[in-house]
Image (spheres, coloured by chain):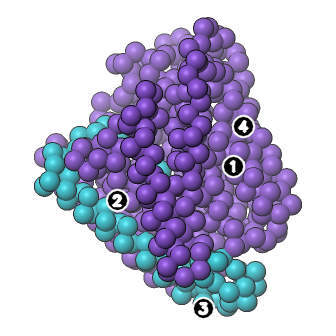
Amino acid sequence: MAGIAGNGLGIAADAGLDHFAAVIRDLVGGFAAFGLAALVVASRMIFGAPAARLTSTSERK
Amino acid sequence: MSGRGEASIAGLVGRQRLFAAIVGLGVFISAVNSVLLVTVLPTAVDDIGGIEFMSWTTTIYVTASIVFSAAGGWMKARLGGRGGLLAGASLFMAGTAICAAAPAMPVLLLGRLGQGVGSGLLAAMSYTFVRSVFPQGLWPKIFALMAAVWGVAALAGPALGGVLTGVVGWRPAILSMMLPALLLVTLVLAALPRDGERGGREPFPLLRLVVLASGILAVAAAGNFPGAGLQAMSAFAGVAVLALVVLADRRAERPILPSNALSFTSEVGLGLAMKWLLIISTMPVSVYGALALQRLHGATPLVAGYVVALEALGWTASAFVVARLPARWSAGAIVMGPLLVVCGVLAGSRTLAYGPLWAGASAVALMGIGFGARAGRS
């Protein structure tokens, strides 16, 4: 794991695999908050505004 | 995926098939590039180092792609459809060549900038191209074809990246992206007439694009600052700058952003907000998923690439199914989409870190199924 630095990940350059796994767990899990926010927006689409009927068949990430 | 459109080019005649091939290639280049890079990057990082900049390979690419998609209208007016496609393909090829030759991560990031600019232009040109050369009745068919191309790219990208990385190395694997771009250039030169009179008298919306890029980068870079305070400040400043761009763009004579882009009372605004929130929620998996699978679970580049590509495959499959459900299922699908993504992300946080591999793969597929459920109905 030498070389894993990732300041955004908060991983030290000499961090081991256990630490890397823990950071991946926290990083991926933490971003679920944005998914929850999307769920709130989806609820607003259904209950707070007319449900969208956009034909976004080709939109992608 | 539209129920009216069929993912084939049956029914197109003569040059329409050639035009469809041009549009498909434009989408294919962007789609396969994203899944191929995911497969190749961990090996590249092993070779040239710079893992601390790994998230920037996505940040810079996505920022450049968004900004130059927004500039697509201006570019089309100034360069024409033919010129815009050629410019996009050329910039993409230049960026690809720089990535493939990169001796260090900063140079690879420069290449990603070129790829992002080219990819953004190609995406914008492809969509405007559909509207300018196909009759409106064929649009659902062409958009369905574009969605199918994403599915093909999700299948082909990891295989291409994984096999080439294993056999000849990561540099030729990246360089292989030149082939579809060269084919696109050949088709454009052969099939499209030179653009006639161009109405490009308007000034380039440089200020709005620079500020837009600054806002996106401030949000994206937040995670790279030490301490929660600085991170929050960067993210807040980015959001504030983006809000200013939207306000300024609304008053502009020629807006570069969709109308109602940030309105939470419109369908467009809500739909875009949900789409981007979901994309952000899965970003760590997109950026670090393949790396985690290879380093923590011993997956080969090919296997890791396919696991990450399961998101795109799940997306295509569920969008195809959900689009064919009766209209009364719409509300359920719109809520079920983000719910499945959240479940997939939470499951992935455990399984990508601690395994087993099949469980991590299932979590990634669940995220894609959630995306597809939303896209099929919203």
Mark whose residue sits in front, 1 or 3: 1
Distance from disc 4 to disc 1, alpha carbons, whole Å, reads 9 Å
**Residue type indicated by callout 2:** Gly
Q: Which residue is mark 2?
A: B370
Mark whose residue sits in front, 2 or 4: 4
Front residue of B121 and B299: B121
User: Do badges 2 and 1 share one subunit?
Assistant: yes
> Which tag, 2 or 1, sits closer to the chain's start?
1
Q: Which residue is mark 3?
A: A18
Number of other residues with Cα within 10 Å of mark 2, as a class: few under 14, some 14 to 19, many 20 or more: many
Indicate the secondary structure of the residue bearing disc 1. Answer: helix
Q: Is residue B285 visible?
A: no
> Which tag, 4 or 1, sits closer to the chain's start?
4
Left or right side of A10 for B177: right
Distance from disc 2 to disc 1, alpha carbons, whole Å, reads 30 Å
Front residue of B69 and B18: B69
Q: Which residue is mark 4?
A: B91
Q: Colour of chain A?
A: cyan
Indicate the secondary structure of the residue bearing disc 2. Answer: helix
Distance from disc 1 to disc 3, alpha carbons, whole Å, reads 33 Å
Which chain is in purple here? B
Q: Is residue A27 visible?
A: yes
**Residue type indicated by callout 3:** Asp
Q: Which mark is residue B113?
A: 1
Determine the chain carrying the residue at label 4: B
Residue found 30% across the figure and 30% down from its top: B4
Residue found 64% across the figure and 84% down from its top: A11
Left or right side of B116 for B278: left
Determine the chain carrying the residue at label 2: B
Q: Position of residue A55 (x, y in %)?
A: 31, 37
